[in-house]
Image (cartoon, helix red, strand yellow):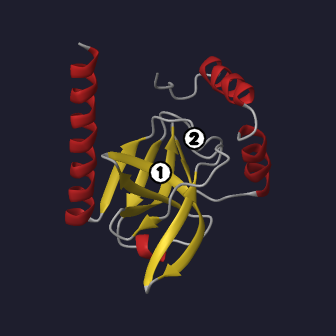
Amino acid sequence: MSKAVTACSTARETLGCELAAEALRSWGRLRLRATGASMLPAVWPGDVLSVCARSATQALPGDIVLFGRAGRLVAHRVVERSLCQDRIQWVTRGDSVEGNDAPVSSHELLGRVTAIERGSRRIVPRLTFWRRIASWVLCRSDFCIRVLLRFSRKQDFPSVAP
């Protein structure tokens, strides 16, 4: 039974990734809800990300990009942009994750996050000095992430996905 459930959720994730990619190609814009905690403190679970396809290939270190990989959508921060065999590739990492992702190709890159909506606030996704410090702490402590997420629930921030 668990294998069937896993296969169905994987098919749904793949379909969702394909639909997001098609929406970005067709209309150039997309809004989607974040579910993971890898981008804390910049992006909280439940935040709504506004993504623009048009400016994706100009993404520079510090920008948050959306890309599709293995049938899933990932929104991580660009830490390096480089030229490899006459092609641009981006190295990304979640703000609260220590290791870099595998390089993102232009075929995987879907868009650049232009705004984060948290409740009634609209936030420009910038990497500030204080976010860097918080990210440094969070990527070294799972305990701090759990405390932060628990605190956010008590403060009536957006709900956290299981």
Left or right: 60 in relation to 161: right
Element at label 1: strand
Q: Residue furthest bottom?
A: 86
Left or right: 48 in relation to 131: left
The residue wearing badge 2 is: 38
Residue 9: image location, x then y, percent:
27, 29
Name the residue: 64% across, 44% down. 97
Name the residue: 23% across, 57% down. 23
Q: Nearer the viewer, residue 54 or 144?
A: 144
Around disc 2, counting alpha carbons within 10 Å, would you say few (fewer than 14), some (14 to 19), or many (20 or more)? many
Q: Nearer the viewer, residue 26 or 135?
A: 135
Q: Quadrant of residue 128?
A: bottom right
Instruction: Give me the C-alpha separation between circle 1 and circle 2.
Output: 9 Å
- Camera sees residue 124: no
Q: Is disc 1 in contact with disc 2, using a CB cutoff of under 8 Å?
A: no
Quarter of the image with the N terminus is top left
Q: Amino acid at mark 2?
A: Ser
Element at label 2: loop
Q: Nearer the viewer, residue 139 or 152?
A: 139
Q: Nearer the viewer, residue 107 or 135?
A: 107
The residue wearing badge 1 is: 75
Name the residue: 37% across, 45% down. 32
Name the residue: 56% across, 37% down. 44
Residue 46: image location, x then y, percent:
47, 33
